[in-house]
Every structure is written in structure tokens, then in C-alpha cells.
Image (spheres, rainbow, N blue to C red):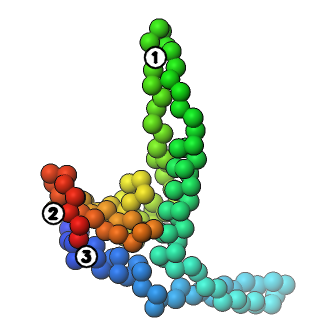
Amino acid sequence: MSKELTKADVLEIIKTLKSRNKVDKSTVKTSLQDEILEAETVSRSRSDYLKNSFTEIARCQAQLDSIERISTEVNGKMVKPVNLQFTARHEVDDFIEKELKARRVGDFVCWKLADGLYKYNPLSDTLVRLNHTGLNNEN
């Protein structure tokens, strides 16, 4: 059974995510015509990956928002257009679930803890807690 996360855990996850000290390097090796070739690569940071993914998600939502919504008559009754939201699964969702121990809800990384729902926006670097009654509390 895994330990239940706390607010301190969430703050540590965000701090580690934003840490610029970690350099993700790896060496790629291959053999070409019996000769071994090596190249060192540097991956983008975890924070940059998250921000780039959320920027892409925001662009998708902006495209949906730009679609003209018109009411349609169905069986003699006017039907209002559906409010379109980008809810498709994105490649960053696996990273959020496995590495951050959270879920993506729209444009937030969310942790559901005993004392409320914590919502982190990686683009604005803000963390907000919603308590159980649904009122906002800044942390």
C-alpha cells in the first residue's frame, strides 16, 4: 500500500520538477558497419517538457474556442451548441501520473489530498488549494 501524499509532498514534487540542477544526459551507442559510434544527448528538462505540453494543450483549446457555435433546430426545438473542451488524453498525462503522482484536469496538474484538491498551473507556476466546500484558498 502506498503512502498518501501530503501538501509537503506536493510542494517537494513541484520544487524537484523546477530544479535546474539536474541535467538529463544520456549516451547513445550504435554499431555501423562493425564500427561503434557514440553521441551524448541532452534531453529537455522535465519542467520544460511539462510547460511545452501545456502550451500545446492551450493551443488545442484555443482552436476549439474559435469554432463558431450556433443553435440548431431539432424536431421543432432549438438546441444550444455544446461547449467544447479539450479532454483528449495527451502524451504528458502518463508523465504526470507516473512522475508527479497526479492527474491532468484541463490545464492543471491536480492532486486530491485529504485536506482538499491542489491545482498547479505549470505555465503561471501557481498552486491553488480548493477545500472540500469548494472555496478557493491560496497557498
Decide which of 85, 34 is in the foreground and name it: 85
> CA–CA distance between discs 1 and 3?
50 Å
Q: Measuring 43% from the left and 57% from the top, which residue is drawn there?
A: 107
* Residue 10 % position (x, y): 28, 73
Residue receiving disc 2: 115
* Residue 113 % position (x, y): 21, 63
**Could you tell me which secondary element the residue under label 1 belongs to?**
strand
**Could you tell me which secondary element the residue under label 2 belongs to?**
loop
Amino acid carrying mark 2 in the image: Asp
Residue 8 numbered tag:
none
102, above or below 9, in the image = above
Q: Residues within 10 Å of mark 3 (few under 14, many from 20)?
A: few
Which quadrant of the figure has residue 43? bottom right
Amino acid carrying mark 1 in the image: Met
99, above or below 65, in the image = below
Which quadrant of the figure has residue 68? top right
Tell me which numbered mark, 2 or 3, is placed earlier along the sequence: 3
Q: Measuring 42% from the left and 69% from the top, which residue is drawn there?
A: 124
Decide which of 63, 48 is in the foreground and name it: 63
Quadrant position of the N terminus in the picture: bottom left
Which quadrant of the figure has residue 13? bottom left
Residue receiving disc 3: 9
Residue receiving disc 1: 78
Instruction: Report whether 103 appears left or right of 46.
Output: left
* Residue 79 % position (x, y): 45, 20
* Residue 109 % position (x, y): 37, 62
How many numbered callouts? 3
Quadrant position of the C terminus in the picture: bottom left
Amino acid carrying mark 3 in the image: Asp
Q: Nearer the viewer, mark 1 or mark 3?
A: 1
